[in-house]
Amino acid sequence: MTDASPQPRHPVLRRLPLIVIVTIAIVGAFTLRDYLSFAALSEHREALIAYRDAHFLLAVLGFIAAYIAIVALSLPGGTMATLTGGFLFGVFPGVAFNVFGAGTGAVLIFLAARWGLGERLAARMEGSEGIVKTIKDGIDENQWSVLFLIRLVPIVPFFLANLIPAMVDVPLRKFAVSTYLGIIPAGLVFTSIGAGLGEVFARGASPDLGIIFEPQILLPILGLSVLAALPVALKFIKKGSII
């Protein structure tokens, strides 16, 4: 009788998607930075607008595909992509295109990381002891809150927010829902900045990305972060423990 059980994937094949992403990200950091910049958008803005007006559907599909590739391959230019979405398509529907592109790219890199490292790393963390196991258990018990927190708090890099959940075996459904919803606030802010780039170009100035730290913008985002953290805080209070 032959053993019909599936053979384990070779370690190199299992990690191949992640290896490809890291390689492209390193190469892109040195070769694409000048092409995914504010100066490049300013230089080509008339051609982009003309193409959008002549081929709107193709412009939308091409923009979303490019945004997905930027995020999934961890290329530089995520913020510029969001600004471009606002510049080309306005706040609405630009924010929808930005959120879909960024969210889908995040899901793809999450899947690549989990397929390459996440399952084995999560199993090792589960079998470990001490602080590593405490962190793993804390995330497992409060997945929704933690996932929304890492999306809403501006200090968490987007790349890390895609990788950390994969390393602790977060379900794809939870990751996707928290990602698409959690990036809306910041996405709306940067899309609105992009929608006003026409005036910025006319003045020969650069966009003020620091606006996200203005009180009228930052405080609502921090308020959402507090709401996301509230269930975790209540659990710690009930247990009488503080991590």
Image (cartoon, rainbow, N blue to C red):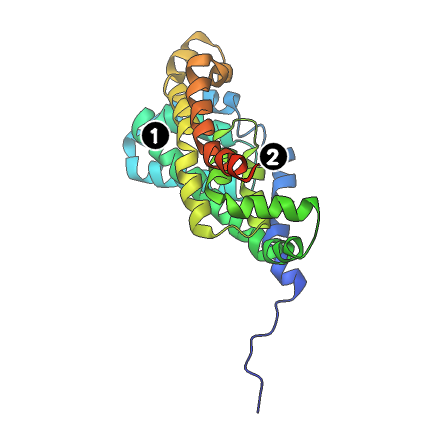
Quarter of the view holding residue 138? top right
Residue at x-position 56% and y-position 40%: 74
User: Which residue is at a point 34% across and 34% down the rendered structure image?
Assistant: 96
- Point out the image quarter for the C terminus: top right
Can you tell which quarter of the image residue 121 is in?
A: bottom right
Give, as a three-letter code, the residue at label 1.
Answer: Gly
**How far apart are the alpha carbons under marks 1 and 2?**
42 Å
- The percent position of residue 61, horizontal first and vertical second, equals 35, 41
Crowding at mark 1 (Cα within 10 Å: few <14, some 14-19, many 20+) = many
Return the x and y of residue 211 as percentages of the image width and height.
47, 15
What percent of the width, then of the height, locates residue 114?
Answer: 56, 53
Tell which tag, 1 or 2, sits nearer the viewer: 2
Q: Is residue 80 left or right of residue 129?
A: left
The quadrant of the picture occupied by the N terminus is bottom right
Q: Secondary structure at mark 2?
A: loop
**Image height check: is 96 above or below 217?**
below
Residue at the spot of label 1: 94
**155 horizontally vs 130: left or right:** left
Along the viewing direction, whichever of 31 and 222 lies nearer the viewer: 222
Dot 2, how many residues are within 10 Å of its Cα: few (below 14), some (14-19), or many (20+)? few
**Residue for point 47% across, 13% down:** 214
- First-in-chain label (1 vs 2): 1
Q: Which residue is more in the foreground, 192 or 212?
A: 212
The answer to whether residue 90 of the structure is visible from this angle is: no
Q: Secondary structure at mark 1?
A: helix
Name the kind of residue labelled 2 in the image. Answer: Ile
The dot on residue 242 is: 2
Left or right, residue 237 beside residue 198? right
